[in-house]
Image (cartoon, rainbow, N blue to C red):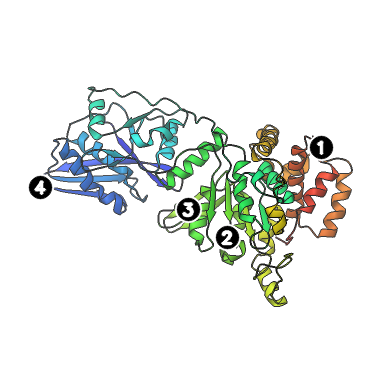
Amino acid sequence: MKPVYGITLQGVRALKVEVEVEITGGLFVIGIVGLPDAAVRESRERVRAALRNLDIPVRGRVTVNLAPADCPKEGAFLDLPIAIGIAQQLGVISLQRPTLFMGELSLDGRLRKTRGAVPAAFLARDLGMPLFVPRGNAFEVSLVPGVEAYALSTLSQLFDHLQGEEILLPLEKQRLPSQKNIPNPDLADIKGQAGAKRALEIAAAGHHNLLFIGSPGSGKTMLARAIRGIVPPLSHEELLESLQIHSSARPDYKPSLEPPFHTVHPTASTVAICGGGASLRPGEISLAHRGILFLDEFTEFRRDLLEALRQPLEDGSIVVSRAAGRVEFPCRVLLLAACNPCPCGWAGDPVESCSCSAYEKERYSKRLSGPILDRIDLHVSVPRLLPKELISFEDQSGEDSETVRQRVCEAREKQRLRWRKYGFHCNAELPERIIKRELNLGTDVRPFLIRMADNLRLSGRGISRVLKVARTIADLDNSSRVRVPHISEALAYRGGGGSS
């Protein structure tokens, strides 16, 4: 009798669970042991009803052991392997080789789409086992290369396959087609703000963090949303990373080559953004992996929450430790933030006058610590346009998003080719050892940078981030070397300073 395997999730990784079944005489009862959660314990009723619907009566005392016993099991995706284990013990079916199953059963035997299919596909590929998943998970599983997977609509369909009556064909490997991105809003729809648009282009090209500061109505949020129209599409490798995270978090995720764009409200909790909880789910910063995390009203977020972002923004991953275990989530995000310059919002505004006292301004500025500002590469002031500029019928919009996107994609491709031998995708990911050796600085850059770093009191991290931004500007300028004008522009976006 071949073993039956299911999965449980630990963060974004699937762990193999062996389903052992023993049936003895006595009054009917199904007992599940092996640290099951409520969803797993309730599977006994779904499994019994689904088997009875196929005229397979279950009698006596049924014990289901989920091994390893000391690993917590959670989720409804163990329904299918439990049903297969019971059916095999009853002699209804027989497995020819160790097999991995996952899926939630309805009472009439239908299989419902569930989360965790992509991590299960990676696990099945690593173990060299076939994988059976619900039909609703077929497309996302077919995007994972090298896995032998089969899609099911009902439990009876699986039984027919195992009994040789209806042979299922493995899923064909799929690739997502390139999609025509329709930016909303388009950069051409935004009047003026040439400096902010340039900063958006640099941020998208090098995956650099960006902070917009401006009075209410200056267009910060519109500019932030416009970045979706200029960021490059995900590579196949990046798509698989994103799929693994989203598949482990929720079953309704639709795969797309467009980078994730997640907006978070200031009332969000630390667990919601950083991840964790009883079942160690990924947070918003991980769901935005390889995409954009937009924090509007940046200064309204709790101080402890913003400080919790310091390490993830630096390392591109976050370790969450709870009583249920310890997991590491990837979170290589472009942080895009926006805030007002003062509590009333009108400091520096050309029309409205600021009513804040010096004490209120100082207290407001301290909501953002030096270390968190030091991790933001581009600090941009967004001035409010006057009514005559906004209502003008003359075309002052400049380039559209598609034109800018082409430049960004070309710059990102240069970075990918340059850094792929080190395993990095873009300039923002570069560690210190590569920055010192591989940036190809012009001969006159070092003395200029030393002088400006002294004047601006840049920290070590600040200098590294200036060099990364300058490398991105050089890529957009089609320059193989980083020159003084590129450093000058990168320094112009540097603000907030702060020590580590």
Q: Mark 4 points at which residue?
A: 26
Which amino acid type is marked by label 3?
Arg
Task: Indicate which label's residue lies in the foreground, 1 or 2.
Answer: 1
Q: Which of 363 and 77 is in front in this view?
A: 363
- On the question of residue 274 being in view, the answer is yes
Q: Name the residue under label 2.
A: 308
Farthest-out residue, left = 26
Q: Distance between the residues labelled 2 and 3?
A: 17 Å
First in sequence: mark 2 vs mark 3: 2
Q: In the rendered view of the protein, which quadrant contains the N terminus?
A: top left
Q: Which residue is drawn at 16% across and 35% down?
A: 54
Location of residue 266 by image quarter: bottom right
Q: Residues within 10 Å of mark 2 (few under 14, many from 20)?
A: some
* Label 1 residue SS: loop
* Label 4 residue SS: loop
First in sequence: mark 1 vs mark 4: 4
Q: Nearer the viewer, residue 451 or 491?
A: 491
First in sequence: mark 1 vs mark 2: 2
Location of residue 311 by image quarter: bottom right
